[in-house]
Amino acid sequence: MSQLFSYSKLDTFTSCPRNYYWAYIKGIRGGESVYTYLGSVAHDLAEAIDQGHTTNEKAVERFKEEVENADMLGLTWITPKSQETYINCVLHYLQFHEASQAANQHIEDVFAVEIGGAVIWGFIDKWCREDGVITITDYKTSSKFSAADLKHKKMQLFIYAEALSRYYPDDQIIIRYDMMKYAKVGNTLKPRNELKIDTEYTEGFVPMEYTATCRQELYDWVNNIITEIDARDPDDIDTWEMGENPQKSFFCKQLCSHCNKCLSE
């Protein structure tokens, strides 16, 4: 029987095998951070605008309410400055995001695709097909990816593209991140809170094309991760190493709910 994975599950192992151990071997998922909480809210509101289920004005007000809810839940920010930047950038996006006019638009489409003996499933944020071209869009409220991070972050889009390519093998597939905190000024992604009133910009898309080379890269990535997971002992935590430094890493201190376990060792 094929093993069942999501991109999130695979990426968790890539980022930190120890986190994977607690979340998927022991089944202890932990709580949310302010970034995952508000990121999910922003993601849902962007989709609601695209579907015509809400207006920009209502989306802005809803996000402000959720910022207050996050505070009441005790979710903390790294610094007051980072809080201000994050909120203002997302508010700018929600205020000016234009509803998609693409024909045959699909939102939160569920998929499952077999890759190298594993079944990977999930939901595609948004995709459309027109004149033999499929465009896949994934919303992101994170900071810009470093070159090192993009090597595995792009696999999320590769998985989506591979799933749709099974149905439309002759189509060209364009994959892109919508980096919600950023706008594109020329060819540069610029934080939205730094835009001037008269600055000309476009949406903060980071596009790529899904090619045969990408497909091979995806298959190698999935197979290597599964081989690494299978090589570890589910009964021995020491075989699941820490991928980050819990004393210094932003991921550990702000995003991982198991950081205290590592700090206590």
Image: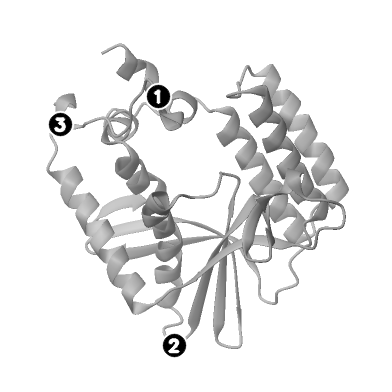
Is label 2 in a helix, a strand or a loop? loop
- Disc 3 secondary structure class: helix
Judging by the rendered image, the residue that carries numbered circle 2 is 170
Q: Nearer the viewer, residue 85 or 124?
A: 85
Residue 248 badge: 1
Q: Which residue is mark 3?
A: 239
Q: Amino acid at mark 3?
A: Thr
* Left-right relation of 261 to 69: left
Q: Identify the residue at horizontal 84%, vertical 38% (top origin).
A: 61
Q: Amino acid at mark 2?
A: Asp
Question: Vertical placement of 230 versus 83: above or below?
Answer: below
Q: Position of residue 133 (x, y in %)?
A: 56, 82
**Element under label 1?**
loop
Q: Are marks 3 and 1 in contact (CB under 8 Å)?
A: no
- Residue 257 in percent (x, y) is at 43, 24
Q: Is residue 258 above or below residue 104?
A: above
Identified at 33% across, 50% down, the residue is 5
The quadrant where residue 244 appears: top left
Compared with residue 187, is residue 250 higher up or lower down, i.e. above or below?
A: above
Q: Disc 3 vs disc 1: which is toward the camera?
A: 1
How busy is the neighbourhood of tag 3: few (under 14 within 10 Å), some, or many (20 plus)? some
Q: Quadrant of the N terminus?
A: bottom left
Residue density around tag 2, few if under 14, some if 14–19, many if 20 or more, within 10 Å = few
Would you identify the image quadrant in which residue 245 lies? top left
- Estimate the spatial distance between the alpha carbons at disc 2 and disc 1, rounded to whole Å: 47 Å
